[in-house]
Amino acid sequence: MIILGKNIHITSFRVISFGFLFVILAGSFLLMMPFASKAPGSASFIDSLFTATSAVCVTGLVVHDTATYWTSFGHAVILCLIQIGGMGVITVAVALAMISGRKIGLMQRNTMKEAIAAPHVGGIVRLTKFIVKITIVIELAGALIMSPIFIRDFGIGRGIWFSFFHSISAFCNAGFDLLGIRGHYSSLTTYVTQPVINLVIMGLIISGGFGFLTWEDVLTHGIHFRKYRLQSKMILTITPFLIILPALFFYFYEYNNVSGSARFWMSIFQSVTPRTAGFNTADLASLSEPSVAIITILMLIGGSPGSTAGGMKNTTVFFLLLSSLSVFRRKNDTVCFKRRISDDTLKNASTILMMYLVLFLTGGLIISCLEKLPIHVCLFETASAIGTVGLTLGITPTLGSVSKLILICLMFFGRVGGLTLIFATSANPRHNLSRFPQEDVTVG
């Protein structure tokens, strides 16, 4: 922590929050340039701010079709914002400082630790190098595999650009696409049965949503699962369930009238993409209400800590489920993989859940009242924003300025993190030696 004055303290949480805010504002002004959009004049500030926030917060919600509204310069700005937001503003800043030969001080190391949810400060520089390397390798591999398909469909120049754009967008869980040239807001619907595009995009989404610490465990320890961090064990355990169970529901209920391979690809893709990615291969507006509800829940859960994904995080849900099971079994401690989970972790998980639910419901109710739209449609939109997903039932481009500002705030909250914002705005904690008497209260 750095103290600038008597009442001014620069903490890691404030550096992270203001870092994201600075990049969003810088991106907004770049997108307001006359040569950034194809429309006469320039994009409005609210639309530029919305797009920049969506890109930096790797959400994917858009008020204009990305392919047809923005120019090549605008696309390049959006892609840079996606990359910065996906890796993390602090990660990119530390990486640039390392490249320039600057010494990484304790303040920068501690900020980096908070930004990527690392367990300790030690080895943070090495971890930063690992994050940069793994990001480049995975994104480059995804682009190379998809390039033959895109080159076949769009030519060499555009095909290569499309390959890199969609690979970065998918790994960063952003959901931005350039396929609107085939139909406004069409996303990947024209590739619904294309196995290469489906597999690569899903693989990139899952890879980005795993978290960089999980990737370090996998590459360091290989198949020796016992040596993994508890966090990595939890992520690798819950992730398959969050993919397979919804996919089975979509296959046997939602798409039971779809024939051929399309039924399989649509089911599995619509199960993966709510993990804060934002791509879609099917018309979401035509989904049944149960399917909309399931996708809404998946969007709120999101990806893993220290990843390119947003949401409450799957470990938060895992912690709460384990805590509930310990209560049901009348156990004093919450245990996972022979490790006891601290009460502070459980309190943080409960706080995060409460914050997400309050903001998700409040935002949806306000937008529904302002726009005179069905509440379930508005809740889908707010879940998509706070979960930094980018899926929509088609109402985002039609929203008014106030509703757009609500979604902007939710996207920022979802990417930076609720606890980070709370700690950034609150005073330093005071440790009191005295405690009030305890008294039990009946709940439930």
Image (cartoon, rainbow, N blue to C red):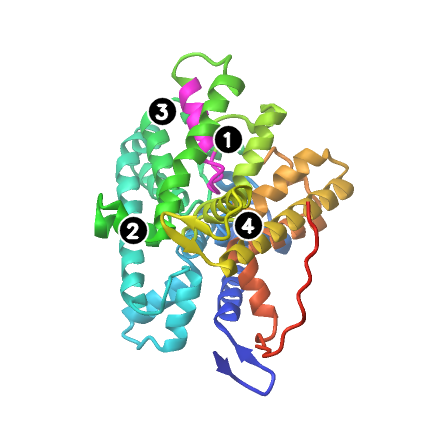
Query: Is 267 in the magenta?
Result: yes
Sequence order check, earlier mark of 3 and 4 = 4
In the rendered structure, which amino acid carries the disc numbered 1? Ser
Q: Which residue is mark 1?
A: 186
As drawn, the label of residue 228 is: 2
Q: Residue furthest bottom?
A: 6
Instruction: Specify the quadrant that holds the C terminus.
Output: top right
Q: Is residue 50 above or below residue 239?
A: below
First-in-chain label (2 vs 3):
3
User: Crowding at label 2, few (<14), some or many (≥20) Cα neighbours within 10 Å?
Assistant: some
Q: Earlier in the sequence, mark 1 or mark 2?
A: 1
User: Magenta segment range?
Assistant: 263-279
Residue 263: tell me if it is visible: yes
Task: Determine whether the residue tagged by mark 2 lies in a helix, strand or loop.
Answer: loop
Q: Residue at x 30, y 50 (%)?
A: 215
Distance from the alpha carbon under mark 3 to that under mark 1: 15 Å
In this image, 304 relative to 384: left or right?
A: left
